[in-house]
Image (cartoon, rainbow, N blue to C red):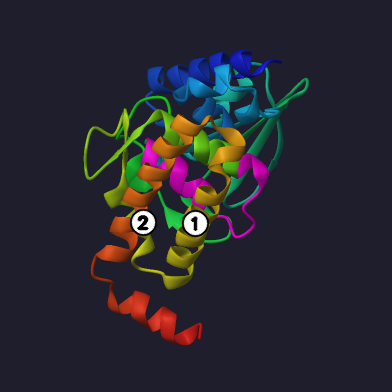
Amino acid sequence: MTTKELVQLGTELVKDANARGMMLRMIGGIAIYARCPSIETNPRLQRVNADLDFMVDEKDWMRVGEIFTARGFVKKDESAREQHFVQDEVTAEISHPHFREDFQIDFSARLNVTPLTLPLADLLLMKLARVNFKVKDIQDATALLVDHRVTTDGEEEEEINRAQLYRVANNDYRLWKTIFDNTVTLEKVFDKYLEPEEAQLAWRRTELLQEVLDGKTHSLGWWAGRVLTR
């Protein structure tokens, strides 16, 4: 299945959930492809996408599987944080809103902000909060930053809300440092993925992220974490 076909299937599944009164949103690479037109025209930002990733409202966790089984998916496995369904070569992974990879982040209040996908800021946050910042994460983050303005509490369907990154990162020094360090990494490699003018645009937007991350007052929890990690 092509990436475009995966986006179409993901969109249909979100709409199916909405019709049943459930709140399901796309996340991950497919969601970013759906929101970033530059990926389609820039081969350096294109990567293999074989899976569909979603996040579902906690109240719908127990019944979200009916959306997928109605579409011919079969449940593969389930844990407290994830459910996996398969259909032919496609795997659909549904995450709990109390998301945990390298860090635990609660996205419960963010699911109803924008339709189809999590807000752009949260899609970017999930990429920047990776201790192992892989090439695919760099590609996805680069696409978000070249295609979308960075604002403070702006129009979240079309803009990256840097205040959201600050609110989440400011409570956890290790998370903050991971996000900040990954923005520094991005600034060093934009030229590898973008034309010079686009690289400058993405760099300026990354500077806006760093400005709010490092330029505002930090919480007591942040300072305590900094002391403990020395």
| 1 or 2: tag closer to the N-terminus | 1
Q: Residue 121: x and y, percent?
A: 38, 42
Question: Which residue is at 53% across, 34% downward?
Answer: 54
Q: Which residues are magenta?
A: 120-137
Question: Separation of disc 1 and disc 2 at Cα?
Answer: 9 Å
The kind of residue tagged 1 is: Val
Quadrant in the picture for the N terminus? top right
- Viewer can see residue 228: yes
Q: Secondary structure at mark 2?
A: helix
**Few, some or many C-alpha atoms within 10 Å of disc 1 (few <14, some 14-19, many ≥20)?**
some
Q: Secondary structure at mark 1?
A: helix
The relative height of residue 210 versus residue 153 in the rendered view (above or below) is: below
Question: Which residue is at 59% across, 43% downward?
Answer: 137
Say if mark 1 contacts mark 2, CB within 8 Å: yes
Q: Quadrant of residue 135?
A: top right
Side (left or right) of 37 relative to 101: left
The relative height of residue 209 versus residue 198 in the rendered view (above or below) is: below
The kind of residue tagged 2 is: Gln
Residue indicated by mark 2: 210
In this rendered view, identify the residue nearer to me: 193 or 47.
193
The residue lying furthest to the right in this view is 88
Q: Main secondary structure of the magenta part?
A: helix
Q: Which mark is residue 230?
A: none
Q: Residue 86: x and y, percent?
A: 72, 28
Q: Quadrant of residue 200?
A: top left
Q: Which mark is residue 184?
A: 1
